């Protein structure tokens, strides 16, 4: 016969360990069971025993608490009559003689009673009225559209996710206006429009800045620093120019002419040489050079950079970067000279990326195919090419722009 746990109301055991060898009336010798298993195997049917003591004054009977399963359909499966099991009796090896797993002690009490029924996803989804919800989102709900407040004002409709509901200051993408359009416009990464200016207006802008103290020497130094920083970034920056990478220093070739653009390139080469870059300056032995070029050459000669006057002395293998400063805004006839054509042919055949600093405006294609172009202050209307145009801040104040009729707002942020 099997007695189920739910049918047991109270269970008691007689403690007769002290009278095992003594005659007893009505009872025979008995041993204490180590555990009790009911016929229905369930985690909720647990029997806990109080810890045994050796005191002789212990009661002859020890109560055992039975955790009974609530009848099926009960509204409260954790009834008020449920008693919590004593942890010490099992953890310390009490009368039960075995330890329950920790997970069973914490989470095993009737946690599997409601796992027999699968969740009805289709029935639950049918309760969701998708059309009504989207109708409210789109603002097409007739009840809300016709709703009026107590003051007679109509309640605004709901906005869609793609409608702009934030009212703020309008972004002006044309913050620079020029009196003479150069015929071409450029756009920054943030969407600001930067118009080009003709060379005559650009020349008047530099002259006005020079009158206010921005001399040619100061401008050359600013352009040299900015172009050097850009070149260092193109060469790999701190990932390549490190003290542990001295044996793989990058090589840069400067192609310069006897004019102010050539002086800008020499200034850039001096700063690159100060950063431990292998710099080779190509500058032919001209009979007449501008004073600014001579001054920059004297400074460059105090660095570890090299200087050559012939194309034959330039590397035959590809270098890391070529900086082109051959063009001149004032003299267009330089392109017809042999040294210019030889330098341009060497740059196009070297397979090295080219950075052009302040190239001249020309209706024809550039003699040297550049990957990057660095313009000064405001860009000039350069010929169509695959070159990416960058703008260099040479430090011209805002009121100097206004002096030549340019409404200027810095695009550098």
Image (tube, grey):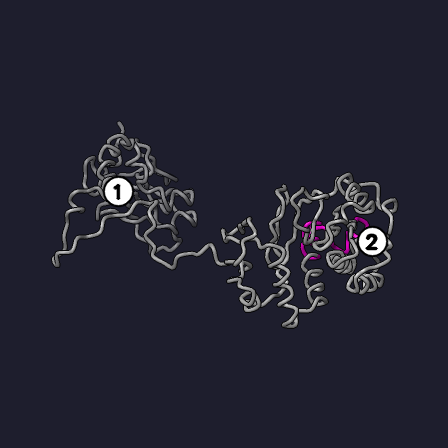
For label 1, the residue is: 138
- The residue lying at 65 percent from left, 66 percent from top is 207
Q: Which disc, if any, is residue 283? A: 2
Total residue callouts: 2
Which comes before the other along the chain, label 2 or label 1? Answer: 1
* Left or right, 225 with reference to 25: right
- Residue 287 as seen in the image, left or right of residue 143: right
Please provide percent x and percent y for residue 75.
18, 41
Q: Does 235 lie within the magenta span?
A: yes
Q: Secondary structure at mark 1?
A: loop
Looking at the rendering, which quadrant does residue 259 occupy? bottom right
Q: At 35% across and 41% down in the image, what residue appears? A: 108
In the image, residue 286 lies at what x, y percent? Answer: 85, 55
Quadrant containing the N terminus is top left
Q: CA distance from mark 2 to mark 1?
A: 70 Å
Magenta stretch: residue 123 in it?
A: no
Does 23 sit left or right of 334 as displayed? Answer: left
| Residue 272, position as x, y percentages in the image | 76, 57
Give, as a single range, the part of the protein colored magenta: 228-248
Note whether residue 102 is visible.
yes
| Extreme residue toward the top, this view | 1
């Amino acid at each position: 016969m099997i007695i189920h746990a739910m049918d047991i109301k109270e269970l008691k055991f007689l403690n007769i360990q002290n009278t095992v060898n003594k005659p007893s009336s009505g009872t025979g010798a008995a041993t204490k069971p180590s555990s009790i298993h009911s016929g229905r195997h369930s985690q909720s049917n647990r029997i806990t025993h109080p810890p045994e003591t050796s005191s002789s004054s212990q009661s002859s009977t020890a109560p055992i608490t039975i955790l009974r399963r609530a009848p099926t359909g009960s509204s409260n499966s954790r009834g008020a009559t449920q008693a919590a099991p004593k942890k010490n009796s099992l953890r310390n090896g009490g009368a039960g003689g075995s330890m329950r797993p920790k997970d069973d002690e914490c989470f095993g009490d009737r946690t599997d009673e409601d796992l027999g029924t699968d969740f009805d996803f289709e029935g639950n989804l049918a309760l969701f009225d998708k059309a009504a919800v989207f109708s409210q989102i789109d603002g097409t709900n007739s009840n809300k559209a016709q709703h009026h407040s107590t003051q007679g004002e109509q309640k605004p409709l709901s906005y869609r996710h793609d409608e702009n509901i934030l009212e703020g200051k309008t972004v002006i993408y044309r913050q620079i206006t020029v009196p003479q359009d150069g015929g071409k416009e450029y756009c920054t990464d943030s969407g600001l429009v930067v118009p080009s200016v003709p060379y005559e207006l650009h020349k008047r802008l530099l002259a006005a800045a020079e009158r206010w103290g921005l001399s040619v020497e100061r401008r050359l130094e600013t352009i040299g620093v900015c172009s050097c920083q850009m070149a260092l970034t193109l060469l790999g920056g701190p990932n390549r120019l490190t003290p542990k990478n001295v044996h793989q220093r990058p090589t840069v070739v400067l192609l310069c002419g006897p004019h102010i653009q050539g002086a800008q390139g020499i200034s850039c080469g001096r700063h690159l040489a100060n950063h431990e870059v292998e710099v080779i300056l190509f500058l032919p032995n001209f009979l007449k050079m501008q004073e600014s070029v001579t001054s920059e050459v004297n400074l460059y000669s105090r660095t570890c950079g090299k200087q050559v006057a012939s194309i034959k002395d330039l590397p035959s293998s590809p270098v890391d970067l070529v900086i082109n400063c051959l063009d001149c805004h004032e003299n267009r006839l330089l392109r017809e000279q042999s040294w210019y054509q030889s330098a341009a042919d060497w740059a196009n055949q070297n397979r090295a990326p080219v950075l052009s600093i302040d190239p001249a405006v020309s209706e024809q294609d550039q003699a040297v195919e550049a990957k990057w172009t660095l313009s000064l202050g405001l860009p000039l209307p350069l010929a169509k090419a695959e070159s990416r145009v960058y703008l260099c801040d040479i430090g011209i104040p805002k009121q100097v722009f206004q002096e030549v009729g340019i409404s200027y707002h810095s695009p550098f942020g």
